[in-house]
Image: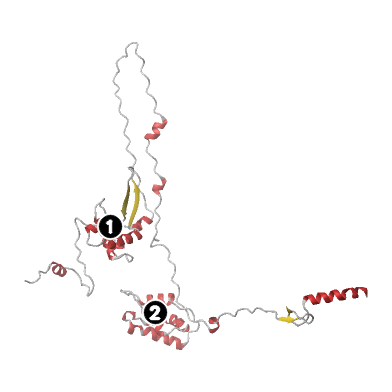
């Protein structure tokens, strides 16, 4: 017997409107009406989470409140082992989706509570707290003004109704709303009408010679041979050529410039001239250092006083020129000092 094939997907594929992509996945979207879980693309397409962690997070979101999601409980329910599930839980905990905290119960027991948040980045932004509704005020009961029977003799006179206490009125009054509940929402993303900073200008060469301009124009015109999506118009080449000359002035090889401009382009490149303008401005290399810049600075020489031999006692001492040491000079000064004084 032949293997049974499901032709439902093939039949649904023929019913999709519009041209279909030549390669890649084709989505057949059928709206859910029951038993579905909303998962954000920040989790489904998270670049820092493994596929096991993303799948485990989706499983945890689909579980009802109060379900055990410990390592052993998940390993008993799913085909993955305990080590793989433990590693996935650590990834979710590192990125803020999961938190495990130890809590002391009133009866003295210690339990571990697991909290899962489907959108942890929303907790970091300011949120507007809804105003608590004021409790409804019940109207006072309507008193019947029917004539009261006369009080018997000897009975105490009826007391006047006590005035309501001020404190009691304050307790019955609705609580004043907290001013923090009406804190204005602070937008973390600037609005579309916010002024934008002008883009940095294209680099300008020191001297735009005819030879360098011709080489820059040829390099830009030749980009479409290496990457067809970088087909430029004559006006675009005329505007970008001075920036390429600035690269050539800094002794950049043409192959290096071509690789920096065309490497890893976006999948859908609509404005190649804008991308080249950005890369020519941001990726501009510094000038090559000269030979004097690469040499190490000369260390300062320390002058060392040489040793001399004393002419009198023949001891070694440091002095720039030959002669007598300090002791011989002092002895000679003391020996001739009284003679000069007597004279």
Of residues 227 and 287, the one drawn nearer to the viewer in this rendering: 287
Quarter of the image where the N terminus is located: bottom left
Q: Residue furthest top?
A: 153
The residue drawn where x is 45% and y is 86% is 212
* Residue matched to label 1: 71
**In the rendered view, does 153 fall on the left or right side of 31?**
right
The residue drawn where x is 23% and y is 72% is 24
Mark 2 falls on what kind of element? Answer: helix
- Evaluate whether residue 58 shows in this view: yes
The residue drawn where x is 47% and y is 84% is 251
Q: Which of marks 1 and 2 precedes in the sequence?
A: 1
Q: Position of residue 34 (x, y in %)?
A: 19, 55
Residue 231, above or below 197:
below
The residue drawn where x is 41% and y is 32% is 167
How many dots with numbers?
Answer: 2
Q: Position of residue 45 (x, y in %)?
A: 30, 65
Q: Residue furthest bottom?
A: 211
Q: Find the distance from the CA under tag 2 to the CA under tag 1.
A: 48 Å
* Residue matched to label 2: 260
How packed mark 1 is, by other alpha carbons closer than 10 Å (few <14, some 14-19, many 20 or more), is some
Q: Quadrant of residue 330?
A: bottom right
Of residues 33 and 95, the one drawn nearer to the viewer in this rendering: 95
Mark 1 falls on what kind of element? Answer: helix
Q: Decide: marks 2, 1 in contact (CB < 8 A)?
A: no
**In the rendered view, does 187 fall on the left or right side of 204?**
left
């Amino acid at each position: 017997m032949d293997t049974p094939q499901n032709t439902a997907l093939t039949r649904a594929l023929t019913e999709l409107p519009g041209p279909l992509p030549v390669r890649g996945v084709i989505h057949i979207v059928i709206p859910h009406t029951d038993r579905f879980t909303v998962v954000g693309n920040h989790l489904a397409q998270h670049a820092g989470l493994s596929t096991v962690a993303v799948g485990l997070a989706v499983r945890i979101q689909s579980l009802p409140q109060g379900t055990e999601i410990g390592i052993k409980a998940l390993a008993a329910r799913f085909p993955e082992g305990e080590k793989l599930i433990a590693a996935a839980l650590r990834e979710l905990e590192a990125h803020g989706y999961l938190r495990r905290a130890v809590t002391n119960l009133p009866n003295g027991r210690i339990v571990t509570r697991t909290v899962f948040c489907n959108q942890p980045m929303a907790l970091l932004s300011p949120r507007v707290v809804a105003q608590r509704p004021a409790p409804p005020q019940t109207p006072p009961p309507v008193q019947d003004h029917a004539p009261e029977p006369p009080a018997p003799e000897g009975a105490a006179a009826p007391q006047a109704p006590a005035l309501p206490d001020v404190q009691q009125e304050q307790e019955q009054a609705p609580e004043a709303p907290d001013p923090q509940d009406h804190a204005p929402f602070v937008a973390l993303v600037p609005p579309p009408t916010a002024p934008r900073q002008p883009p940095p200008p294209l680099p300008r060469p020191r001297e735009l010679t005819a030879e360098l301009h011709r080489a820059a124009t040829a390099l830009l015109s030749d980009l479409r041979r290496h990457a067809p999506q970088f087909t430029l118009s004559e006006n675009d080449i005329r505007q970008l050529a001075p920036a390429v000359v600035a690269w050539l002035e800094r002794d950049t090889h043409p192959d290096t410039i071509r690789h920096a401009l065309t490497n890893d382009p976006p999948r859908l490149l609509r404005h190649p001239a804008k991308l080249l303008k950005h890369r020519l401005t941001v990726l501009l290399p510094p000038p090559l250092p000269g030979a004097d810049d690469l040499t190490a600075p000369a260390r300062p020489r320390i002058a060392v006083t040489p040793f001399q031999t004393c002419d009198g006692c023949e001891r070694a001492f440091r002095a720039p020129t030959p002669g007598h040491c300090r002791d011989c000079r002092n002895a000679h000064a003391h020996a001739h000092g009284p003679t000069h004084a007597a004279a």
